Image (cartoon, rainbow, N blue to C red):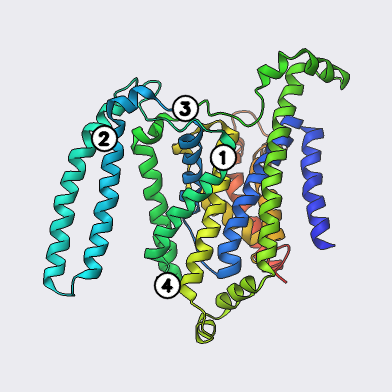
Amino acid sequence: MRAALLFAAVAALILVTGFVQSWNTALLILNMGLVSAVMSLGVNLQWGFAGLFNVGIMGFVAVGGLAVVLTSMPPVPEAWGAGGTRLIGALAFGAGLIATAILLWKRMPKGRNRGLALTALMIVGFFVYRWILDPAVDAVEAVDPAATGYLGGLGLPVLLAWPIGGLMAAGVAWVIGKTALGLRSDYLAIATLGIAEILIAIIKNEDWLARGVKNVIGLPRPVPYEVDLQADPAFVERAAGFGLDAVTASTYTVKLGYGVLFAIVLVILLVLAQLALHSPWGRMMRAIRDNEVAAEAMGKDVTRRHLQIFILGSAICGIAGAMMTTLDGQLTPGTYQPLRYTFLVWVMVIVGGSGNNFGAVLGGFLIWFLWVQVEPMGQALMSVITAGMADGSALKAHLLDSVAHMRLLTMGLVLLLVLRFSPRGLIPER
């Protein structure tokens, strides 16, 4: 009953937004709330099930966004002809170099010779790799840099980018997990945060990959374009039957289309997460979370299970990142900030209820609603408070300027109140 009432309250907040402000705003909050719920579900899988403190959520979300470009954008034939084959060859050489170094480390006996051989291999291999890569990158980025300057994608349907984004994030998580999951929880947090920043730096600076900070715009959409709907006489007639003009009706239709797709993904992931939670595997993961030493004494491979759930949670975050980039219609690496894509997601999980999948989903909707609505609410509140103050007053100007900080203040206040009065979240773990 408590969970139902809380979800009903959040739904009422979104409906009130539609009636008081606009339905466009309400639908935008709904869509981003669905995406945020998927993100928090992935983090809850790592933290709520296994106690893994991942502070690199931003990196996995960005990898999911990158997958949309690599999957759905059409290839650029001129760029491929200029240096695409050589660039792919350089990447294959780099992967082979790393594999050779790992094999060398495992096969050679410990000692000075192994260290010298590995050092020589990496130094020579690095210069050969750059000799192959750099000319190819320069040639690709020189192809119409104002419009392209990158290789493009595979030209596949954009909906395929969502599971591919999850797979790419899972692959990155496997590499990170193999190197970082053996660390203590606080060191794991530092490592994941640093690796996330490295991923963002790569996406920003490697223009051949996704145009870097020049952004990739015009991504394909899984729903119709508004102008196409407005040009359809049947759609215009149906819109008139509801008392709407074609422009407004097309905007609502597109946002509702995204909402339906996002809701389907969320429901599927939520059902799978619930089945996992109540399975023997889920009970084992919570046992490992509560007491690793006891679980290991019972024969459980703790490191392997940690890697497993780290990959699963990161894959869900990658799917959410692909969904969000599809909704935006563009990839903008400069917008990936830890405050938005790490701290805020953690607030969603903690406020909703760590260890409870429905709590994570509730936190995603509630915190995103507050993130969007607090600033206009703060603006209205400050306007009322300063209404009687003289124009040009320093205090009035200061109070009105402080509205921009209402978001951060509110997030901190909500987090403190929940931790004080409901420390296990609004919907606690059973």
Does the residue at mark 2 contact the one at mark 4 (Cβ under 8 Å)?
no
Report the Cα–Cα distance between label 1 and label 2.
Answer: 27 Å
Indicate the secondary structure of the residue bearing disc 2.
Answer: helix
- The reply to whether residue 332 is in sight is no
**Residue under pointer 2:** 86
Q: Earlier in the sequence, mark 1 or mark 2?
A: 2
| Along the viewing direction, whichever of 140 and 359 lies nearer the viewer | 140
Does the residue at mark 1 contact the one at mark 2 (Cβ under 8 Å)?
no
Q: Nearer the viewer, mark 2 or mark 4?
A: 2
Q: Which of marks 3 and 4 is nearer the N terminus?
A: 3
Indicate the secondary structure of the residue bearing disc 4.
Answer: loop
Residue 250 x, y percent position in the rendering: 73, 22
The circle on residue 74 is 3
The amino acid marked with disc number 4 is Arg
Indicate the secondary structure of the residue bearing disc 3.
Answer: loop
The amino acid marked with disc number 3 is Pro
**Residue under pointer 4:** 184
| Along the viewing direction, whichever of 353 and 132 lies nearer the viewer | 132
Asked if 335 appears above or below 54 in the picture, the reply is: above
| Along the viewing direction, whichever of 328 and 112 lies nearer the viewer | 112
Image quarter in which the C terminus is found: bottom right
Does the residue at mark 1 contact the one at mark 3 (Cβ under 8 Å)?
no
In the shown orientation, is residue 85 left or right of residue 219?
A: left
Indicate the secondary structure of the residue bearing disc 1.
Answer: helix
**Residue under pointer 1:** 160
In the shown orientation, is residue 20 left or right of residue 422?
A: right
The amino acid marked with disc number 2 is Arg
Q: Nearer the viewer, mark 3 or mark 4?
A: 3
Q: Which of marks 1 and 4 is nearer the N terminus?
A: 1
Which residue is found at the position 70% from the left and 28% from the top?
A: 254
